[in-house]
Image: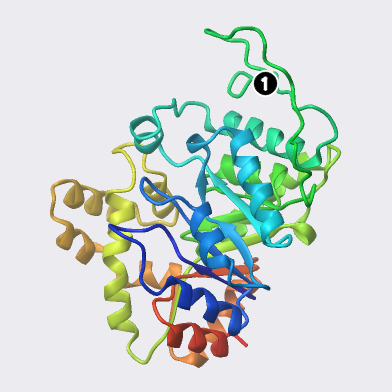
């Protein structure tokens, strides 16, 4: 099992010890360091800044939001960081949700699957640099010939030669259609709130995408596909206290990180069998009763999506997650001691 340090996105300001954590992740054998974005800090800059002090760990985005950048602009970021890191960059993408896409980026959220397919296709063209980039799809037409166009758009190839034509592209996906699309067109799946108990269901979704990919020029299979699951892994002798600390974050994603009636995170927990919990948490959270919402989250739900306990328990659970198909655990660690303890427990 590989480990990835998830730096996440910033709150009101940058974390004070991020450089120290990144250095520790490299020292103690982590495979990668990831950064995220919401509607504040971006995901690329922290990797360039803090990742410049590393030489081995992969540097990935988990995730950058597609609506924040055109596909060509995203490809420019990716090929630049790949060169600067010596071929260690992993591009993780996600569609986000309608509240952010339409409220922050001012873009329509409709047809996320079709948009993702076009977006990845353009990225692949840029990285391959075999011909000027073109796209006839309705979402990211290249050259642009729509309203306001001067008709002078010219198909272009990137000036800078990408270091790797096969730069890995991973997709953040939660629903069955999105996961199937991921295994069809991408190199990895960034899974949030993964539950090993449901591995059979996830495998069905992934196999659907693998089957479709075999009808194309770039067939994919489990052998060349990564499953990176976000999972809080904490080595502790007081698991109950840690789970209590995690509950407010779970309640936030169930009740506050999505629009009522269209919250993809809430749908994940509903598919897990916690439909009543989702309704109760959502109702309390939307009413401003966030502390009560957190208290509604049951221990067994937190236990399904995290690994918390002593070193022996952590080792056993990591093996269980690996058998369920996970290749990388994306973990959030707040100090060097936690990184060291986790590395030792997973060896």
| Residue drawn at x 65%, y 68% as measured from the top left | 327
Give above or below for 258 relative to 336: above
Q: Quadrant of residue 227?
A: bottom right
Counting from the top left corner in percent of width and height, residue 108 is at: 44, 25
Q: Quadrant of residue 154?
A: top right
**211 displayed left or right of 41:** right
Q: Residues within 10 Å of mark 1 (few under 14, many from 20)?
A: some
Question: Which of the two residues, 162 or 159, is positioned nearer the viewer here?
Answer: 159
**97 displayed left or right of 12:** right
Q: Secondary structure at mark 1?
A: loop
| Residue drawn at x 48%, y 37% as measured from the top left | 68
**50 displayed left or right of 14:** right
Counting from the top left corner in percent of width and height, residue 274 is at: 35, 57
The residue to which callout 1 is attached is 142
Give above or below for 280 relative to 28: above
Counting from the top left corner in percent of width and height, residue 234 is at: 43, 81
């Amino acid at each position: 099992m590989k480990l990835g340090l998830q730096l996440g996105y910033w709150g009101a300001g940058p974390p004070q010890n991020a450089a120290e954590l990144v250095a520790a992740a490299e020292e103690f054998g982590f495979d990668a360091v990831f950064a995220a974005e919401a509607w504040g800090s971006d995901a690329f800059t922290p990797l360039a800044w803090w990742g410049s002090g590393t030489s081995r760990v992969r540097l990935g985005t988990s995730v950058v939001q597609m609506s924040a950048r055109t596909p060509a602009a995203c490809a420019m970021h990716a090929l630049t960081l790949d060169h600067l890191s010596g071929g260690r960059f992993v591009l993780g993408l996600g569609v986000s949700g309608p509240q952010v896409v339409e409220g922050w980026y001012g873009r329509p959220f409709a047809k996320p699957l079709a948009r993702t397919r076009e977006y990845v296709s353009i990225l692949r063209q840029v990285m391959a640099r075999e011909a000027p980039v073109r796209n006839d799809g309705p979402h990211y037409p290249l050259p642009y010939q729509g309203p306001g166009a001067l008709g002078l758009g010219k198909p272009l190839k990137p000036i800078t030669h990408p270091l790797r034509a096969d730069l890995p592209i991973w997709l953040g996906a939660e629903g069955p259609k999105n996961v199937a699309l991921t295994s069809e067109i991408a190199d990895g799946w960034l899974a949030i709130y993964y539950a090993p108990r449901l591995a059979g269901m996830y495998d069905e979704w992934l196999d659907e995408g693998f089957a479709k990919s075999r009808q194309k020029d770039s067939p994919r299979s489990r052998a060349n596909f990564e499953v990176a699951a976000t999972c809080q892994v904490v080595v502790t002798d007081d698991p109950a206290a840690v789970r209590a600390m995690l509950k407010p974050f779970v309640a936030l994603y169930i009740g506050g990180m999505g629009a009522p009636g269209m919250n993809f995170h809430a749908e994940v927990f509903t598919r897990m069998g916690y439909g009543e919990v989702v309704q109760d948490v959502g109702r309390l959270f939307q009413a401003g009763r966030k502390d009560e919402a957190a208290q509604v989250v049951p221990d067994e739900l937190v236990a399904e999506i995290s690994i918390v306990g002593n070193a022996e328990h952590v080792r056993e659970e990591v093996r269980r997650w690996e058998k369920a198909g996970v290749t990388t655990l994306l973990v959030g660690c707040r100090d060097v001691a936690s990184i060291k303890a986790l590395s030792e427990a997973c060896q």
